[in-house]
Image: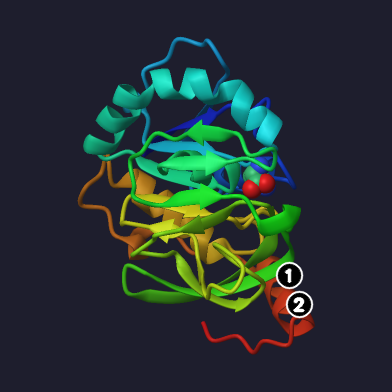
Amino acid sequence: MNLKVCWMYHDIMDLYGDKGNMLVLQKRCEDRGISIKIDTLSIGDTCDLSTYDLLFFGGGADKEQLLLIDDLLKRKDNIKQAMEQGTFVLLICGGYQLFGQYYISADNEKIEGLKFFDYYTETGTNGTRCIGNIAIQCTLDNETYTVVGFENHGGQTRNISTPFGKVLYGCGNAFQESYEGFYNGQVLGTYIHGPLLPKNPKVADFVIYKALLKRYPEFKKEDLQPLDDTLENQAHEAILRKLGISNKA
Ligand code: GLN
């Protein structure tokens, strides 16, 4: 089996270990004999995103988001085409914000988003930011998981009818909101860095499974060969314990 991944703006959108998500996908695929090819995309590169099974877009500071936005908006039709053809999309923080209507930066500059979804992101009142460890509980395609990580965002994202999960600890989409991220079956957007996938191996496998569906529509998640996740699960549990949360999944 083959998996083709495009890591968008790898050179500028890579906060708090987002790169680790790519390393984890690569290792978990290789350990199972799934051939994975990870291409990178920088500003100005020519590339047909619809040829990929998975698009990954990490987080970045306001400065980086402003730097890439013109290039990203030019790719709107191509990203739409990719999604229509079944490409799965994983977005972290700054990347997640830019798939919505707009993002108001800390300097009150409005950055127009791709507007694929109704959510929009405004800046925290008086420069406040959501910073720290985060844990959520989510149900993805009928399976419930706890997900742990780290968040650091000024952006307050609102108007989401299908969040990724419910916040157990931390902020999530906005201060005083109890939900985190966005998930519509094909696009998973989240504020969780840390990076997301190493301490959440079930989410890593979920992403691999969803990405494989484009080429292998008959593939079932149970078909993924089990791996020894002892260390990963210990890391996951250690964070939950530290946060005073008992594992619910
Ligand atoms: N610059 C954005 C914000 O502060 C995104 C930050 C990030 O990707 N961690 O909200």
**In the image, which disc is placed on residue 215?**
none
Write down the quadrant of residue 129 in the picture: bottom right
Residue 11 visible in the current orientation: yes
Residue at left 79%, top 81%?
242
* Any part of residue 26 in sight: no
> On the image, which quarter does residue 231 sit in?
bottom right
| Camera-side residue of 175 and 108 | 108
Count of numbered badges drawn on the protein: 2
Q: Residue 99 occupies which quadrant of the picture?
A: top left
Q: Residue at x 32, y 67 (%)?
A: 141
| 82 relative to 99, above or below | above
State the image coordinates of residue 150 (x, y, percent, origin top left): 71, 61
* Residue found at x 76% / y 77%: 238
Label 2 Cα crowd, 10 Å radius (few <14 / some 14-19 / many 20+): some
Find residue 238 and name its label: 2
Instruction: Please provide percent x and percent y for residue 42.
Output: 58, 18
Find the distance from the CA under tag 1 to the CA under tag 2: 5 Å
Q: Position of residue 1 (x, y in %)?
A: 36, 39
Type of amino acid under label 1? Ala
Q: Of helix, strand and loop, which one carries label 1?
A: helix
Q: Ligand 1, what quadrant?
A: top right
Give the amino acid type for the residue marked by disc 2 in the picture: Ala
Q: Nearer the viewer, residue 23 or 155?
A: 155
Reading the image, the residue beneath label 1 is: 235
